[in-house]
Amino acid sequence: MKPLDRYNLLLSGLLAGLLLIHLYLSDSAIPRLTGLQAAKINSIEILRDGQLKIALLRDKQGWLMTHPEVIRASQKQVARLLSVLGADTHWQTPIKQIDRADFGLASPALTLRLNNTELAFGNAFAPSSQR
């Protein structure tokens, strides 16, 4: 093997290693929206402008919508809703350090209540429309 080939091989291995380290660190460094686990959620309420719009309860057969009417809920849709628990966050700050009104959280447009934990959704921010 030529010396130049050895250097190219060594350099390729080094770059691959650095890429793996970067991917591992960047994925694990992104904080999640909550530490809640979907399997431990038994009650979901969705409130719009403070008014209850949808209520769901988990029973032995799966999820049951109890408000605005009593029917079996789509398990697929509930799983999709619960996927918000592990959503990536791109920015976090302690709530005590902000003015809730600046973020539309003084009276949130939407509140998701999971067991006893509330997630309030305020204003979207331009240009990315993040909340």
Image: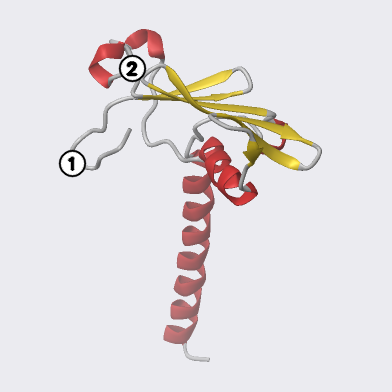
**Residue type highlighted by circle 1:** Pro
Q: Residue furthest left?
A: 127
* Vertical side of 131 occupied by 26: above or below: below
Q: Nearer the viewer, mark 2 or mark 1?
A: 2
* Vertical side of 32 occupied by 92: above or below: above
The residue closer to the viewer here, 62 or 17, is 62
> In the image, residue 11 lies at what x, y percent?
45, 71
How many numbered marks, from 0 up? Answer: 2
Task: Locate residue 125: give its quadrant.
Answer: top left
> In the image, residue 33 lies at what x, y percent?
49, 32
Q: Which mark is residue 21?
A: none
* Vertical side of 4 occupied by 96: above or below: above
Q: CA distance from mark 2 to mark 1?
A: 19 Å
> In the image, residue 90 lies at what x, y percent?
38, 36
Q: Secondary structure at mark 2?
A: loop
Q: Which mark is residue 127?
A: 1
Q: Residue furthest bottom?
A: 1
The residue closer to the viewer here, 95 or 84, is 84
What residue is shown at x 47% (from left), y 39% (from top)? 30
* Vertical side of 102 occupied by 129: above or below: below
> Disc 2 designates what residue?
105
* Drawn side of residue 45 relative to residue 41, left or right: left
Q: Does the CB distance between marks 2 and 1 fall below 8 Å? A: no
Q: Residues within 10 Å of mark 2 (few under 14, many from 20)?
A: some
Q: Residue furthest top?
A: 96
Q: Secondary structure at mark 1?
A: loop
* Drawn side of residue 47 relative to residue 59, left or right: left
Q: Residue furthest front?
A: 69
**Residue type highlighted by circle 2:** Leu
> In the image, residue 104 lies at what x, y percent?
28, 20
